[in-house]
Amino acid sequence: MKQVSIFAENVKGAMQSITQTLTDAGINIMGMVTNDSAEYGIIRMAVDKTDDAIAALKEKGYICKSQTVIGVEIEDMPGALNDLLEAIAVSNVNVNYIYISYNRSSTRPIIILHTEDISEVSNCLQGKGFKLV
């Protein structure tokens, strides 16, 4: 799956400006995580229309790109995230970051993660019976 990564200035109203841009373009945000520093931050989002989101944001002057990530549907119960991370640990690949969304149809959590080797981890998880989205 693809996500949008946005490089944004850490100023008052920046997040709302981004969400307004996506609202105006009819883009639905399904999951999001932000990392900030004193002056700039990176906002990572799973959206329903990645290419349209990037076009709308670039039109407003934002620096952004799409990036391949892995989406994995898990059970909504204690230990489910740990089971997923344990399965990834077997592949000996580092998880750079994760955030959570959910499947609106099944109402189950979707863990969105980025690793150093998307293909290796995807194959590992599918081999262990995890449902990739």
Image: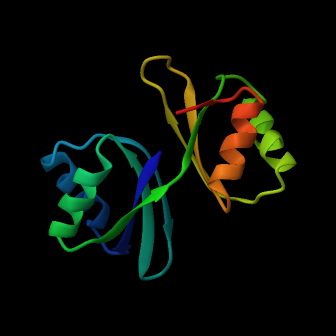
Q: Can I make out residue 81 in this image?
A: no
Is residue 114 toward the left or the right of residue 93 in the image?
left
Q: Position of residue 18 (x, y in %)?
A: 26, 60
Q: Position of residue 7 (x, y in %)?
A: 38, 72
Image point 72% across, 37% down: which residue? 125
Image point 77% across, 43% down: which residue? 85
Q: Position of residue 64 (x, y in %)?
A: 34, 68
What colour scheme does the image use? rainbow
* Residue 31 to residue 35: above or below: above
Is residue 80 toward the left or the right of residue 65 in the image?
right
Residue 75 picture quarter: top right
Is residue 10 toward the left or the right of residue 73 in the image?
left
* Residue 112 to residue 34: above or below: above
Looking at the picture, tell me which residue is in the foreground, 95 or 22. Answer: 95
Is residue 16 toward the left or the right of residue 33 in the image?
left
Looking at the image, the residue that sits furthest to the top is: 106
Q: Can I make out residue 18 in this image?
A: yes
Q: Position of residue 45 (x, y in %)?
A: 41, 52
* Residue 35 to residue 2: above or below: below
Looking at the image, the residue that sits furthest to the bottom is: 39
Image point 23% across, 63% down: which residue? 57
Label tally: 0
Residue 60 picture quarter: bottom left
Looking at the picture, tell me which residue is in the foreground, 78 or 94. Answer: 94
Image point 67% across, 62% down: which residue? 116
